[in-house]
Image (tube, rainbow, N blue to C red):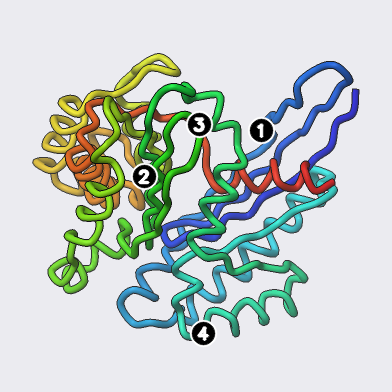
């Protein structure tokens, strides 16, 4: 048996995460990926980028502190290899690359700016095939703070994929929300799912994971469109403070969970899906698996 420790840093629009995993390999046995530690820091970069177009000095300094802390944690855990990936908020910020250079000079942590296509490919390197049936059709929806990745696959093959600049943090900005046009997404989803019967959704992202946990469903079971719609209405009629106080949601989750629910509901409505499956997979998990594959 061989055990290696790898780490993934996911720099999103709503938060920054460090995942440290044990990768266990043994002859004649499937590789196991065991979470050793997960740290989530609520640095909302999207609130800067999607409103002002730049990362603020305050959030830049918080990122530097976070990377220093993550580096210390990786050293303590004995991490052999890591990868840090930044998505839409850093990608769209006019000073994003400048901050990445400063972080590297200050902390020695190298950050890769990745596009939506690369993000989807990394996520798909996870064991998503364990959750799908080869004779069925699915619409995979990964909702982030700045963008949402849509992937249609049928009979085990990817049919089409596209990333849209529709994310939870972006939609929270009232000006951006008013100007937001859902029609291109609706058109794409309808065109790419119209010939697929019995299509189901696979939901990815912190918000749908939280909704699934709140449902009390057993792992592997689906949520219905009716349930998700009722839950959305339930959350929406509560105030931000009530969601924190009565439901125990984190402050940086209590607001974004509303636009996230709307994105998943729209995707289900436009594709005709009546069920959504929620395997706990994400960018961090994909990074860990690709690090193992590369080694």
Q: Secondary structure at mark 4?
A: loop
* Residue holding disc 4: 95
**Residue at 57% of width from left, 55% of height from top?**
10
* Residue holding disc 1: 35
Image quadrant in which you'd find residue 99: bottom right
Q: Is residue 150 above or below residue 219?
A: below
Along the viewing direction, whichever of 63 and 206 lies nearer the viewer: 206
Q: Is residue 137 left or right of residue 179?
A: right
- Cα separation between marks 2 and 1: 22 Å
Q: Secondary structure at mark 3?
A: loop
**Residue at 57% of width from left, 65% of height from top?**
114
Question: Residue 156: which numbered mark, if any?
Answer: 3
Which of the marked residues, 4 or 3, is nearer the chain's N terminus?
4
Question: Residue 250: which numbered mark, if any?
Answer: 2
Q: Secondary structure at mark 2?
A: loop
- Disc 2 crowd rating (10 Å Cα; few below 14, some 14-19, many 20+) is few
- Cα separation between marks 2 and 4: 29 Å
The answer to the question of whether label 4 and label 1 lie on touching residues, with beta carbons closer than 8 A, is no
Marker count (numbered): 4
Which of the marked residues, 4 or 1, is nearer the chain's N terminus?
1
- Cα separation between marks 3 and 2: 37 Å
Nearest to the eye among marks 4 and 3: give it.
3
Which of the marked residues, 2 or 4, is nearer the chain's N terminus?
4
The answer to the question of whether label 3 and label 2 lie on touching residues, with beta carbons closer than 8 A, is no
- Cα separation between marks 1 and 3: 27 Å
């Amino acid at each position: 048996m061989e055990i290696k420790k790898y780490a993934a840093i996911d720099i999103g629009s709503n938060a920054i995460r460090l995942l440290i995993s044990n990768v266990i390999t043994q002859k004649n046995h499937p590789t196991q990926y065991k979470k050793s530690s997960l740290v989530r820091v609520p640095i909302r970069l999207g609130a800067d980028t999607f409103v002002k177009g730049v990362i603020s000095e305050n959030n830049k300094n918080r990122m530097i502190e976070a990377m220093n802390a993550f580096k210390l944690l990786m050293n303590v855990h004995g991490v052999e290899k890591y990868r840090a990936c930044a998505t839409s908020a850093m990608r769209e910020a006019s000073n994003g690359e400048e901050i990445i250079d400063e972080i590297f000079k200050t902390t020695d942590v190298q950050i890769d700016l990745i596009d939506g296509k690369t993000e989807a490919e990394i996520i798909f390197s996870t064991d998503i095939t364990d959750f799908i049936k080869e004779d069925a059709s699915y619409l995979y929806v990964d909702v982030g703070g700045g963008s949402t990745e849509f992937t249609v696959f049928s009979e085990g093959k990817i049919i089409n994929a596209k990333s849209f600049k529709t994310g939870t943090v972006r939609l929270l900005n009232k000006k951006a929300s008013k100007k937001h046009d859902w029609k291109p997404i609706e058109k794409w989803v309808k065109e790419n799912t119209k010939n697929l019967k019995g299509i189901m959704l696979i939901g990815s992202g912190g918000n749908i994971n939280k909704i699934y946990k709140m449902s009390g469903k057993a792992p592997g079971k689906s949520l219905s469109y009716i349930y998700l719609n009722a839950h959305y209405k339930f959350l929406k009629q509560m105030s931000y403070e009530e969601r924190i106080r009565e439901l125990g949601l984190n402050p940086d989750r209590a607001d974004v969970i509303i636009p996230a629910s709307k994105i998943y509901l729209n995707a289900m409505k436009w594709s005709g899906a009546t069920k959504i499956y929620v395997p706990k997979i994400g960018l961090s998990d994909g990074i860990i698996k690709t690090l193992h594959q590369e080694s």
